[in-house]
């Protein structure tokens, strides 16, 4: 199974159960059970100036990547402010609250796994009533080794898949087990001019949110032209490939759930197709 769509601002809405516990908060779903996913709940959230979301806990793990504006987070005993290209993990069952004390809306990409329950059944979000904030909130000290499960994206130490038909690809995985994530991976990807990622599939679900540039994405027997704010999701075993187009580097946010197995999480078709020539 697979799905290709686009982030649509008109789909912003107050999530079910949040009307009495938030101000100026909305979410637009990108991928969930409605498109065939069984592991992911991905979306874009926004919080208006002076807006807030009261402290709550989820029966899942959540990753936040700030796209625009400034966002303050109270996570357990930690309180910090984030800005564009900062990210944070909310571990399973951890109380957390959000607010925007700035003058511009804050907007972020959000990933949850296990997948949140749909409306109408057992709910997996619980508000705690602990809504006190300290007098001052500062940005995290990213250089301090004691700063845990929060970071600022920098294109360094890339994973660079290689092999026949693959070139110009860099993947920067920043939310993983070492970071504290247990249920999913989050990363940034870049495909430079003329680059390609040959056809392959995975044992996990994969999600892509295009940030800039353009690329063709082949999924199974269809070709899609991805541009800024486009969305693509591939289910387990769905073959896919990328081919750069245009003049600008293609950049995206990517998530995978569940986390990759220790071995053989990717099947590169070019490697296996060589066996067809063996007598």
Image (cartoon, rainbow, N blue to C red):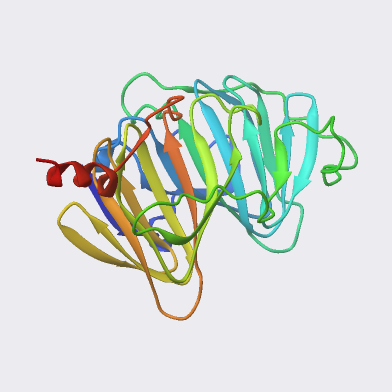
Front-most of 275 and 122?
275
Residue shown at the point (39%, 51%) measured from the top left: 163
x, y (%) of residue 64? Answer: 59, 42
Residue 8, horizontal then vertical, whole percent? 38, 61
Report the side of 41 relative to 18 (left or right).
Answer: left
Q: Nearer the viewer, residue 27 or 78?
A: 78
Left or right of 184 on screen, residue 115: left
Instruction: Using the image as rendered, state which of residue 116 and residue 52 is in the foreground.
Output: 116
Relative to 279, is 101 above or below?
Answer: below
Res. 18 visible in picture: no
The quadrant in which residue 206 appears is top left
* Count of numbered tags: 0
Residue situated furthest bottom in the rendering: 247
**Residue, far front:** 279
User: Which residue sits furthest right?
Assistant: 135
Residue 26 appears in the rendering: yes
Q: Quadrant of the N terminus?
A: top left
Q: Residue at x 47, y 81 (%)?
A: 247
In the picture shown, does residue 252 fall above or below 204?
Answer: below
- Which residue sits furthest left? 279
Q: Is 32 on the left-hand or right-hand side of 125?
A: left
The quadrant of the picture occupied by the C terminus is top left
Which of 54/33 is in front?
A: 33
> Where's residue 30, x and y in %?
38, 49
Q: Picture coordinates of residue 207 (x, y %)?
A: 39, 46
């Amino acid at each position: 199974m697979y799905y290709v769509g686009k982030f649509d601002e008109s789909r912003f809405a107050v999530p079910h159960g949040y009307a009495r516990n938030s101000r100026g908060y909305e979410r637009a779903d990108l991928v969930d059970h409605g498109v065939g996913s069984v592991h992911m709940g991905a979306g874009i959230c926004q919080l208006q100036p002076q807006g807030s979301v009261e402290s709550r806990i989820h029966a899942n793990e959540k990753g936040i990547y700030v796209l625009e504006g400034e966002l303050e987070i109270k996570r357990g005993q930690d309180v910090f402010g984030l800005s564009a290209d900062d990210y944070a993990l909310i571990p399973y069952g951890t109380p957390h609250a959000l607010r925007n004390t700035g003058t511009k809306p804050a907007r972020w990409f959000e990933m949850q796994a296990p997948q949140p329950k749909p409306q109408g059944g057992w709910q997996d979000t619980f508000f705690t009533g602990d809504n006190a904030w300290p007098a001052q909130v500062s940005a995290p000290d990213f250089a301090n080794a004691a700063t845990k499960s929060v970071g600022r994206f920098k294109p360094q130490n890339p994973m660079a898949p290689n092999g026949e038909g693959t070139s110009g690809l860099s993947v920067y995985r920043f939310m993983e087990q070492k970071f504290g994530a247990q249920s999913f991976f989050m990363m940034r990807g870049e495909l430079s001019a003329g680059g390609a990622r040959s056809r392959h599939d995975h044992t996990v679900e994969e999600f892509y949110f295009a940030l800039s540039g353009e690329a063709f994405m082949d999924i199974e027997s269809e070709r899609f032209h991805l541009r800024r704010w486009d969305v693509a999701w591939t289910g387990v075993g769905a073959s896919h490939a990328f081919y750069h187009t245009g003049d600008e580097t293609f950049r995206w946010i990517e998530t995978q759930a569940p986390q990759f197995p220790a071995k053989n999480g990717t099947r590169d078709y070019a490697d296996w197709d060589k066996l067809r020539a063996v007598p």
